[in-house]
Image (cartoon, rainbow, N blue to C red):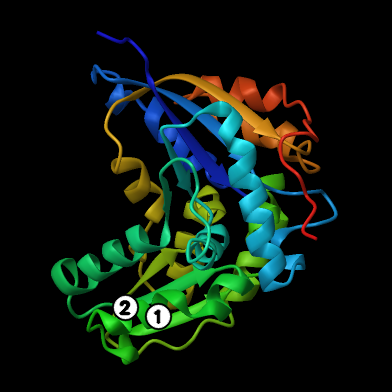
Amino acid sequence: MSNKKQRIIVCDSGLGGLNIASGYFSPARREEKEEKEILYFNAFPDKDLGFNDLTASGQEKMLQNVLEGMEKFSPDLCLIACNTLSIILERLLKYYTPSFPVQGIVDIAVKGMKDFLTEKAPSSHILILGTKSTVESNIYASRLLEQGIGAARLHSLACPGVAKALESGPGAEKVKALIASFAALAPEIPAGTKCALAFCCTHFAYGEEIWKNTFREKWGYIPVILNPNAWMTEMITGKGKSFRYVSRIGLFDGAKENMPSVFMKEAPQIAEALKNVQEDPSLFSISIS
């Protein structure tokens, strides 16, 4: 009988998906017998070039480059944690087939939000929080509408800059100020109605308490948090046995100093990896011609 452990790649453009990778090392998983090799693949192309800087076709080509770069690791499964990359993935899969299974976060998030709105809180509203590109795609609202959720219950708020700020310092005062500035722009919710916050950006979970406290001041109650990161982690049984981090680029300013402490208690393997990040420009090609 083979003792080969299943190798799971968790992929994000940045560090947001570490929220998902860390779940496999949580104390709740320690009694599970099946062990996984967890490899975190940071798909951020270059410090001066992100996916949102590319045209639609450029995004698709870059993601194809990323998936081809993963082949050397022989994954059994790739989880695309990033909302933006998952949206690009759906377009790419119409004409490109990776050599290993790939699962994006969009369908998982839609199912979780629908279950909440239909089964757990049938009178609640939901505020979809995401990056500018995710919110402008309207993918979550449109798919929830297709699932029979009334349009009046769905609200969206783009929060550009929050992801990078959280990655550089999750508890920084500038993060609190930035989140407060976006909360001030949030759509009005009908009086007497409660609204949940849906994190449609993996990074946003790093500031969960800030989001809660900010919207408690705005609405007068602590909102329920809907976190697709947790739903994606729950897809896979087993516990993490080993962890490896790979990236074309180093960490952004502040991340090396602040992010290891986020994982030190429950996932020290991740904390240690973040202290020793090595740039690997050969990880995948950034040519999109």
For the residue labelled by badge 1, is the local secondary structure a helix, a strand or a loop?
helix
Is 218 drawn above or below residue 3 in the view shown?
A: below
Question: Is 240 or 175 nearer to us in this picture?
Answer: 240
Question: Is 19 or 41 nearer to us in this picture?
Answer: 41
The residue furthest right is 48
> Residue flagged by tag 1: what amino acid is it?
Ala
Quarter of the rendering containing residue 233: top left
- Residue placed at 64% from the left, 36% from the top? 259
- Residue placed at 72% from the left, 58% from the top? 174
> Alpha carbon of mark 1 to alpha carbon of mark 2: how far?
5 Å
The image's mark for residue 144 is 2
Quarter of the rendering containing residue 88: bottom right
For the residue labelled by badge 2, is the local secondary structure a helix, a strand or a loop?
helix
* Number of numbered callouts drawn: 2
Q: Residues within 10 Å of mark 1 (few under 14, many from 20)?
A: many
Quick check: 151 left or right of 185?
A: left
Mark 1 near mark 2, Cβ–Cβ under 8 Å?
Answer: yes
The image's mark for residue 141 is 1
Quick check: 152 left or right of 127?
A: left
